[in-house]
Image (spheres, rainbow, N blue to C red):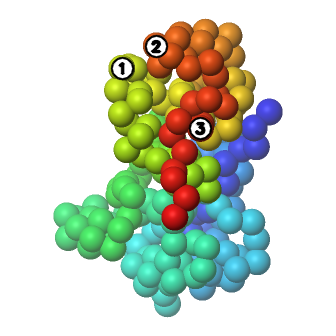
Amino acid sequence: MDEKSRIMVIDDDRTSLCITEEALCKHYIVMLAPSGEHALRMLRSVKRPDLILLDINMPGMDGYETFEHINNIDGLSGIPIIFLTGMSNSDAELIALRLGAQDFIPKPFARDNLLMRIGMRLKSSRQEQELQQMYQEKQSAGINEKKFAELTQVLKPMEREVIRRAVLGYNNREIADQLGYTPGYVKNLTIFSYNKLGVSGRIELRELVRSQPK
């Protein structure tokens, strides 16, 4: 079973912390911080959260300042941050989005709406990480993008995506997990695509799209 995503909630209002924790605890590992300062200490010493819910109006370090401090900590700048706040005016939302927040949700919130929007941001973050990983793997694998595009132009977009992952070295089960298909379907799709491309398999295809040595 996959490990639950970790959500940090930063809010000086204890009641709000409890309400938010209750809404999330069945689906996520919840980390509570009663102030921006406390959150920064936690972030330097505990496992990196997958998403942060951040209040704005807090004594001492407010949400905007906390946001900027988090983004200045090495390894934390990519964490999606959603402002979850009682400040519902348009100016507050505009400032939050200009800072780079992923979303802005006024309190009191509807539980299902909160869960849906968190789920969307987590999915988007995972997809971005997967794309970045694929780019890095592509670079190390030495794929010549021009050659790959020319060779695979006869494929449909999904076939091309499966073949790209095959070239990068993923097996059928891994590709199936990434794209939400069964391993059997991926196997049939790769065989069909290889026939379209006129190649015998991954090794031959990898040789055809390999970057030329500098």
Residue corresponding to mark 2: 196
Cα–Cα span, label 3 and label 2: 17 Å
Choose top left, top right, bottom left or bottom right for residue 199. Answer: top right
Query: Percent x, y for residue 90?
Result: 19, 64
Observer-nearest residue: 204 or 160?
204
Q: Amino acid at mark 3?
A: Glu
Left or right placement of residue 5 versus residue 12 in this view = right
Q: CA distance from mark 1 to mark 2?
A: 7 Å
Mark sitting on residue 163: none
CB under 8 Å between callouts 3 and 1?
no
Q: Is residue 98 left or right of residue 174?
A: left
The quadrant where residue 36 appears: bottom right
Q: Which mark is residue 207?
A: 3
Q: Amino acid at mark 2?
A: Lys
In this orientation, does residue 17 appear?
no
Residue, disc 1: 154
* Residue at 41% from the left image edge and 28% from the top image edge: 152
From the viewer's perspective, is 126 left or right of 41? Answer: left
